Amino acid sequence: MVDLDILQINLARMIKLSERLRDAKVALQNNMPLNVAMFNPDSKDSGFLLQLDGFRVRFADLQDILGQVIFPMVCQYDEDETTQYPLSTRERIVLMEKKV
């Protein structure tokens, strides 16, 4: 059984990470969209590269908390997953897509 207090704490962490990702996206707005064919990191200033790296890290952090914490807890809460029968990441993603 999932502890709802722990789920709420993790959902709050996820929301905070999504807000930080949104802020990182706003900081990059003046340099978007990037042209993949023309993108050369050596021609960009270090401030822009730090902003781009910040976006990448925040995206990865959000992806990690969703995949490693939130999705498993939701599956356990909905009794789609038990400790005896753990789901693969792919199975969890398929379940999450069905829930929306």
Image (tube, rainbow, N blue to C red):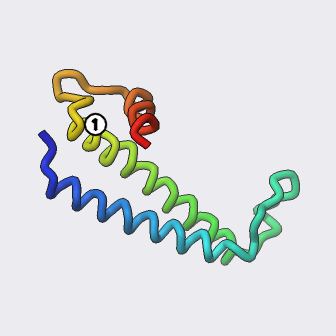
Which residue in the structure is indicated by mark 1? 75
- The percent position of residue 80, horizontal first and vertical second, equals 26, 29
The answer to whether residue 79 is left or right of residue 23 is left
Quadrant placement of the C terminus: top left
Tell me the kind of residue under disc 1.
Cys
- The percent position of residue 45, horizontal first and vertical second, equals 74, 75
The relative height of residue 89 versus residue 64 in the rendered view (above or below) is: above
The relative height of residue 69 versus residue 44 in the rendered view (above or below) is: above
Residue furthest top as drawn: 85
Q: What element carries label 1?
A: helix
What residue is at 53 percent from the left and 69 percent from the top?
A: 22
- Disc count in the image? 1
The relative height of residue 31 versus residue 5 in the rendered view (above or below) is: below
Quadrant placement of the N terminus: top left
Which sits in the foreground, 30 or 2? 2
Which sits in the foreground, 79 or 20? 79
What residue is at 82 percent from the left and 68 percent from the top?
A: 43
What residue is at 78 percent from the left and 61 percent from the top?
A: 34
